[in-house]
Image (cartoon, rainbow, N blue to C red):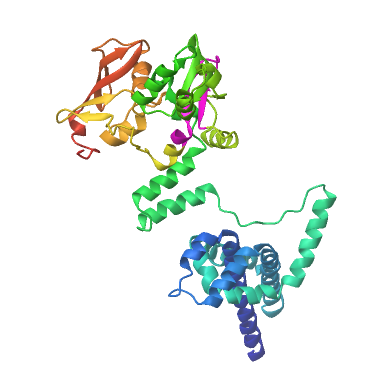
């Protein structure tokens, strides 16, 4: 009887140790798969961990593949041992083989819920801290299984080659979504200020921005015919403060080149017979309006040009884009000595505003705290066209849940100015007073 009790205790102790081993290797697997180097670096402070812990954690994060293979070996061993001990306990110690199926079911449920699922859930949300705290023990334990793990990796790579696949190596990469989460987390924790967060958001959105969203629209382009005189060009540059002027033949749909102010000044000061603007013109880059902003930026840099003409699907001129326009998409408005700092939204009374119809629709929503219906438009003018579905007349209105829009000025089928009357429910939301 005493021997039987000792046998039961030894089997129970062995099963418990196996269960702890299963939990440990489950933690190791999730930690190695989920650990993020950037977050790990944030936790690796002198007050939180010593130099050895930091070095070990980074080693595990960097060399995760062989350790993951060791986890596979380490996880299966305690499962097999636990199954053998349970079978031997029920069949040979208790001599009740009829209970074996029930014991196996109970053991599986216990392993899955308490020693597999629970450790995995905890480690998923604390992968960096677990790696930092248990790194040395994990490295030592898994190191014992690495020889067998190397054999498994070699066999696996051999099978992949036989099947025609290329054995891959796991790389610790950080996805864009992870970076976005880190930016949000940084702002919530006060590490990043709002301007810094906005800058990061602009960088993420830059490659999704199209040329037509950045360009100066065709009606706002300052350009000259190729037949214009040198004096006309210099006067235009002095008036506008621009350093480059596109030239067109007959209409602005036929851009022939671009002239630079430095060339015009040199030509004006020259004693030789002045050349025509067409002779002074440089070639211009044409890009489709659907071109991504990041591709456009790289193309303009590679061609060493500061200006490009954006064309629509029919080949007509849709607008003009400069390197400065693209940079402003990331860093915000750049105001130089020639720019006039004018707000596109001017408050005339409590809930009434005069709005430039070229304002970006998202900027308007953010500034006035209103929500407008979604649609295929980028500006307030485009929104009104979308709602009316024709060229509006002065005084026509568009109503939404949050505001009423009254068209105040239209020129050449283009909406220039709109009066916005915000609903009382939106009183003074989302806007701070301007100096």
Q: Is residue 118 left or right of residue 171?
A: left
Location of residue 16 (image quadrant): bottom right
Quadrant, the N terminus: bottom right
Relative to 420, residue 153 above or below: below
Residue 307 lies in magenta, yes or no? yes
The magenta region covers 306-326
Determine the residue positioned at 53% across, 71% down.
Answer: 132
Residue extending farthest to the right is 162
Q: Residue 226: x percent and y percent?
A: 49, 14
Q: Is residue 193 left or right of residue 35?
A: left
Location of residue 221 (image quadrant): top left
Relative to 29, residue 134 above or below: below
* Residue nearest the viewer, comparing 48 with 236: 236
Residue extending farthest to the left is 349
* Residue nearest the viewer, comparing 191 with 423: 191
Q: Is residue 331 left or right of residue 356?
A: right
Residue 98 lies in magenta, yes or no? no
**Residue 122 seen by the camera:** no
Relative to 340, residue 137 above or below: below
Residue extending farthest to the bottom is 2
Q: Is residue 345 left or right of residue 307?
A: left
* Residue nearest the viewer, comparing 432 with 240: 240
Quadrant, the C terminus: top left
* Residue nearest the viewer, comparing 147 with 360: 360
Q: Residue 316: x percent and y percent?
A: 52, 15
Q: Residue 345: x percent and y percent?
A: 25, 30
Location of residue 62 (image quadrant): bottom right
Q: Residue 115: x percent and y percent?
A: 56, 67
Determine the residue positioned at 49% across, 27% down.
Answer: 263
Determine the residue positioned at 28% across, 34% down.
Answer: 341
Relative to 296, residue 68 above or below: below
**Residue 180 seen by the camera:** yes
């Amino acid at each position: 009887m005493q021997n039987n009790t000792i046998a039961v205790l030894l089997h129970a102790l062995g099963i418990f140790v196996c269960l702890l081993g299963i939990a440990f290797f489950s933690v190791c697997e999730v930690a190695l798969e989920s650990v993020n180097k950037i977050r790990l670096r944030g936790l690796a402070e002198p007050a939180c961990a010593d130099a050895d812990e930091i070095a070990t954690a980074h080693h595990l994060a960097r060399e995760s593949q062989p350790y993951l293979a060791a986890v596979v070996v380490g996880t299966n061993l305690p499962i097999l041992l636990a199954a053998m001990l349970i079978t031997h306990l029920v069949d040979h110690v208790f001599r009740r083989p009829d209970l074996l199926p029930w014991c196996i079911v109970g053991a599986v449920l216990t392993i899955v819920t308490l020693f597999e699922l629970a450790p995995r859930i905890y480690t998923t949300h604390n992968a960096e801290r677990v790696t930092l705290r248990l790194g040395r023990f994990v490295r030592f334990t898994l190191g014992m299984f690495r020889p067998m793990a190397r054999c498994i990796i070699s066999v696996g790579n051999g099978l992949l080659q036989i099947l025609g696949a290329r054995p891959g190596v796991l790389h610790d990469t950080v996805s864009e979504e992870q970076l976005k989460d880190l930016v949000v987390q940084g702002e919530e924790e006060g590490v990043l200020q709002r301007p810094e967060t906005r800058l990061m958001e602009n960088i993420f959105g830059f490659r999704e921005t199209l040329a037509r969203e950045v360009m100066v629209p065709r009606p706002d382009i300052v350009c000259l015919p190729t037949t214009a005189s040198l004096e006309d060009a210099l006067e235009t540059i002095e008036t506008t403060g621009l350093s480059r002027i596109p030239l067109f033949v007959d209409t602005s749909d036929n851009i022939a080149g671009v002239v630079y102010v430095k060339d015009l000044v040199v030509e004006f000061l020259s004693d030789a017979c002045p050349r025509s603007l067409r002779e002074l013109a440089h070639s211009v880059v044409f890009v489709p309006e659907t071109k991504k902003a990041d591709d456009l930026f790289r193309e303009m840099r590679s061609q060493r040009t500061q200006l490009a003409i954006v064309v629509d699907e029919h080949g007509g001129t849709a607008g003009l884009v400069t390197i400065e326009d693209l940079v402003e998409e990331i860093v915000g408005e750049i105001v130089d000595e020639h720019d006039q700092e004018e707000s596109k939204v001017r408050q005339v009374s409590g809930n009434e505003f005069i709005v430039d119809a070229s304002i970006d629709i998202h900027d308007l929503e953010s500034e006035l705290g209103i929500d407008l219906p979604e649609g295929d438009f980028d500006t307030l003018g485009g929104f009104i066209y979308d709602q009316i579905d024709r060229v509006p007349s002065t005084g026509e209105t568009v109503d939404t849940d949050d505001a009423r829009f009254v068209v105040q000025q239209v020129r050449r089928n283009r909406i220039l100015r709109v009066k916005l009357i915000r609903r009382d429910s939106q009183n003074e939301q989302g806007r701070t007073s301007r100096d």
